[in-house]
Amino acid sequence: MARMWGATVALIAAVAGAGAGVGAGAATAADPTPAAPVSAGGKAAVARQAHFEDQAAGFKAIGDELKKETPDKAAIQAGADKINATAQDLPSWFPRGSGPEAGVKTAAKAEVWTDAAGFADAAQRLQDETAKLQQVAMAGDLDAIRAGVRATGAACAGCHAKYREPDKH
């Protein structure tokens, strides 16, 4: 069990840390407004990276606590709150003109904008899982938290598989 949990934490850290391009979201990806200038798109991509770093920090905080003999449930709750808040805002991180078609350096695939319905579904899965994780974190059940972290990580990975360029490391 400890080995499996360690692998799960490593997967989640990789998924969360890889957030420099795509997580899940689409509300603004489907926005029919004209494309923003590249400079604005570049700013959106930089902001998107910062938001994904916030998500990664939330995952790391939870993972670090769950490795401890006596996890700090308040720290876990704070991490879950951060992950859920960022997931709820995530759709706004992908405005038109902030993708590869505009010459913006990003790991987001064009499908983020061309498959807006699929991207919206992926965003909703992440939002659902982070909300569940936040709830089990409030309850303090460590086994349920571990399961919630795995489910949230799977939602991240599912979106990355379709909407994010693979890491080149």
Image: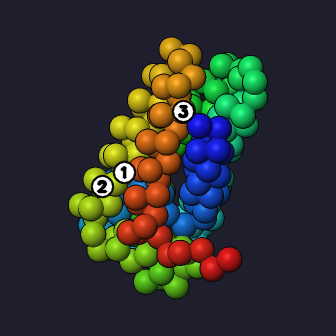
Q: In the rendered structure, which amino acid carries the disc numbered 2?
A: Ala
Determine whether, in the image, residue 164 is placed left or right of residue 71.
Answer: left
Among the 4 quarters of the image, the one containing residue 94: bottom left
Is label 1 in contact with label 2 (beta carbons under 8 Å)? Answer: yes
Q: In which quarter of the image is the N terminus?
A: top right
Disc 1 versus disc 3: distance between alpha carbons?
A: 21 Å
Q: Mark 1 points at which residue?
A: 123
Mark positioned earlier in the residue sequence (2 or 3): 2
Q: Foreground residue, 9 or 61?
A: 9
Residue 125 visible, this angle: yes
Mark 2 element type: helix
Crowding around mark 1 (Cα neighbors within 10 Å: few <14, some 14 to 19, many 20+) is many
Residue 146 is marked as 3
Crowding around mark 3 (Cα neighbors within 10 Å: few <14, some 14 to 19, many 20+) is many
Residue 120 is marked as 2
Q: In which quarter of the image is the C terminus?
A: bottom right
Q: Residue 7: horizontal and vertical position, in percent?
A: 62, 50
Among the 4 quarters of the image, the one containing residue 117: bottom left
The residue located at (52%, 85%) in the rendering is 103
Marks 2, 3: nearer the viewer: 3
Q: Residue 144: horizontal and vertical position, in percent?
A: 48, 25
The residue located at (32%, 60%) in the rendering is 119
Crowding around mark 2 (Cα neighbors within 10 Å: few <14, some 14 to 19, many 20+) is many
Mark 1 element type: helix
The residue located at (37%, 51%) in the rendering is 123
In the image, residue 57 sits, relative to residue 78, either above or below, namely: below
The residue located at (27%, 61%) in the rendering is 118
